[in-house]
Image: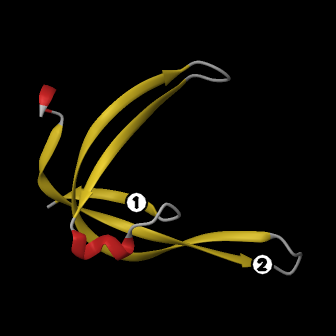
Amino acid sequence: MSAKTFFRFSHNIDVYQKTTSTNAAGQQVVTYTKTATIPAQFQSITSDRRIEPYVANIDEYEFYISYQDLSYISYSNRIQNVVDR
């Protein structure tokens, strides 16, 4: 990969699944529960700087996950705790 941005060694990532429930007041409550810890590889794609309405650095990462672990991945899930082995 160019600029040596590819992390070729496997990392362990925690996958958290989104659950939506309704509380006594009738409001939607979103909670995330840990589903699994799976191996993955990732690389940094881009880093943008936004100045409006506030200053923020936005990083984008691309994850490579085995086809055997695809059942854990969804747009509503979150990936946290990326740790190298």
Give the image quarter of residue 73.
bottom left
Residue 30, given in percent of the width and then of the height, sits at 66, 69
Q: Residue furthest right?
A: 25
Which residue type carries mark 2? Thr
User: Can you tell which mark lies on residue 79?
Assistant: 1
Q: Is the N terminus in the top left, top right, bottom left or bottom right quadrant?
A: top left
Judge by depth and name the residue closer to the eye, 62 or 25: 62
- Horizontal side of residue 10 vs 37, given as left or right: left
Q: Amino acid at mark 1?
A: Ile
Q: Residue at x 45, y 66 (%)?
A: 74
Point 23% across, 70% down: residue? 67
Relative side of 23 to 34, left or right: right
In the rendered image, residue 69, in percent from the top left (x then y), is placed at 28, 73
What residue lies at 63% left-to-right and 23% top-to-bottom?
Answer: 54
Task: Relative to 57, say whether 39 is above or below.
Answer: below
Would you say the residues marked 2 and 1 are in contact, meaning their CB atoms lie under 8 Å apart?
Answer: no
Distance from Cα at disc 2 to Cα at disc 1: 24 Å
Q: Secondary structure at mark 2?
A: strand
Residue with the most extreme front position: 67
Expressed as whole percent of the image width and height from the top left, the position of residue 32 reads: 54, 70
Residue 15 spot, x, y in % from top left: 39, 68
Q: Which residue is mark 2?
A: 22
- Is residue 77 rendered to the left or right of residue 19? left
Quadrant of residue 10 within the rendered picture:
bottom left
Q: Secondary structure at mark 1?
A: strand
Q: Badge 1 local density, few (<14 within 10 Å), some, or many (20+)?
A: some
Question: Would residue 33 appear left or right of 1 to someone viewing this image?
Answer: right
Q: How is the image coloured?
A: secondary structure
- Dot 2 or dot 1, earlier in sequence: 2
Which quadrant: the C terminus? Answer: bottom left
Mark 2: few/some/many CA within 10 Å (<14, 14-19, 20+): few
